[in-house]
Image (cartoon, helix red, strand yellow):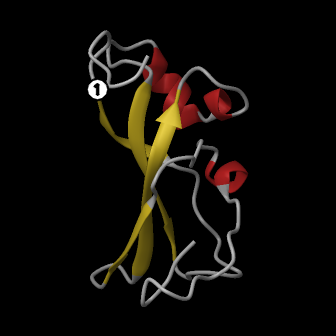
Amino acid sequence: MSSPDGIVWEDYTDISYQLQARADTSNNGVFDPETGEFMIFTRIDCQYPPFNTNPSIVANCSKPWGLRRSARSVSKRWGAGANWSVAKGCSHGVAGYEQCK
């Protein structure tokens, strides 16, 4: 959901399957004027299907980074009709040192 004033909110649209990421946290969206794209940051999680089939996640699940990590997705549009890319990992924790297990 988004709101320009924090009072009136747009309807919620679940894009987790489009991202192939959990997208179940406080996702953040920003506009990058250099690329002309909107970027959203979300959580990816190695252990839960169908999100654990995302190639960006599977490639890193065997590395010692823990199960949870952050990812980003991009789109030229915001809101209805946006076509978000599959989420790509952009930061990670360390196995055994995660906020939640």
Pick out the residue farthest to the front: 7
Q: Residue at x 49, y 48 (%)?
A: 25
From the viewer's perspective, is residue 4 above or below residue 25?
below
**Residue 39 located left or right of residue 79:** left
Q: Which image quadrant is residue 66 in?
A: top left
Q: Residue at x 71, y 49 (%)?
A: 17
From the viewer's perspective, is residue 17 above or below residue 48?
below
Quick one: label 1, few (<14), some, or many (20+) residues within 10 Å? some
Image coords of residue 5 (percent x, y)? 42, 90
Q: Looking at this view, is 8 or 15 the one in front?
A: 8
**Residue 93 located left or right of residue 10:** left
Q: Looking at this view, is 73 or 6 the one in front?
A: 6
From the viewer's perspective, is residue 89 above or below residue 14?
above
Q: Which amino acid does label 1 sit on?
A: Gly
Image coords of residue 12 (percent x, y)? 68, 70
From the viewer's perspective, is residue 50 above or below residue 42?
above
Q: Which element carries disc 1, helix, strand or loop?
A: loop
**Residue 2 located left or right of residue 93:** right
**Residue 93 located left or right of residue 38:** left
Q: Which residue is drawn at 73% across and 32% down?
A: 50
Which residue carries the number 1 mark?
Answer: 93
Q: Which image quadrant is residue 83 in?
A: bottom right
In the rendered view of the protein, which quadrant contains the C terminus?
top left
Image coords of residue 29 (percent x, y)? 42, 69
Q: Residue at x 44, y 21 (%)?
A: 67
Q: Report the number of numbered marks.
A: 1
In the rendered view of the protein, which quadrant contains the N terminus?
bottom right
Image coords of residue 41 (percent x, y)? 41, 56
